[in-house]
Image (cartoon, rainbow, N blue to C red):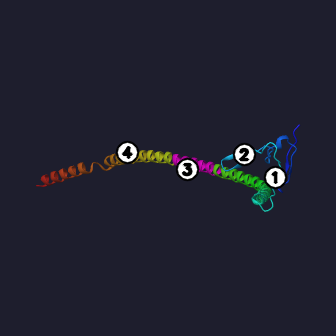
Amino acid sequence: MYGDIKSNFSGKSSSSLPMGGLPKSKFGHTTPRTRGNVTSFPAVGSSSRPQSRAGGPSRGVKRDIERLWETVHQQQVIIERQNQEIERIQRMVEPMSDVLKRYCDQAERRMCKKVDKASSDQIKTNTRIDNAIAALRRAKASTDEKTRVFQEQVAMLSSQLQFLNEEIFGDPNGGMAEAQQEEEGSDADAQ
């Protein structure tokens, strides 16, 4: 039914459209020709062959497009290389990350064991100290009780010694009074 327009950047095109046809864009859509604000469509009977483009402005556009495509291609190559480098680094880092994680886990377990051991040792030491303090308090209470009993016994012995002394030797004050009375009595008899 309709033929299509085959065009390339060199400006050559072939058309088999009836009524001259419209030029097609890169994506296959027909586009009208625009000059300023006025849009004109090709005439029905006019030839659809483009004008000679040797050295015209379309040559510069073609170069710009080719440069852009080269730049895009170069950027794509750079991006692909960077992606490959990132993947390579990730492959290198993954084992190191696993090793570091295992090392950190082991270090954390070791530290927890050390802290637990130090804590249990401290608890044992505190228990021993508490037991020693309790034993010292008990010993002090026992010593205080023995000292009190000893002092009571000393006081009792002292009073018994005094009583025995009085029984054996008599009352020291009372004995002197009797001796003085006897002396006075004997002096009075002598006179």
Residue 44 versus residue 188: which sits nearer the camera?
A: 44
Q: Nearer the viewer, residue 146 or 30?
A: 30
Of the numbered discs 2 and 4, the one sitting upstream in the chain is 2
Question: Disc 2, disc 4: CB below 8 Å?
Answer: no
Q: Quadrant of residue 30?
A: top right
What residue is rendered at 56% in x and 49% in y? 126
Give the spatial CA distance, label 2 vs label 1. 15 Å
| Magenta segment, prevailing SS (helix, strand or loop) | helix
Q: Nearer the viewer, mark 3 or mark 2?
A: 2
The residue that mark 2 highlights is: 40
Which callout, 4 or 3, points to the residue nearer the camera?
3
Could you tell me how far apart the alpha carbons at marks 3 and 2 are, in whole angstroms? 107 Å
Q: Which region is colored magenta?
A: 117-135
Categorize mark 1 by other alpha carbons within 10 Å: few (<14), some (14-19), many (20+): few
Reading the image, the residue beneath label 1 is: 50
The residue to which callout 4 is attached is 156
Q: Point out the image quarter for the C terminus.
A: bottom left
The amino acid on which the numbered mark 2 sits, given as a three-letter code, is Ser
Residue at the limit of the structure toward the front, as seen here? 45
Residue reaching furthest to the left: 191
Mark 1 is on which residue type?
Pro
Instruction: Identify the mark at residue 129; answer none if there is no mark.
Output: 3
Q: Is residue 154 left or right of residue 66?
A: left
Could you tell me how far apart the alpha carbons at marks 1 and 3 are, in whole angstroms? Answer: 108 Å
Q: Are marks 3 and 2 in contact (CB under 8 Å)?
A: no
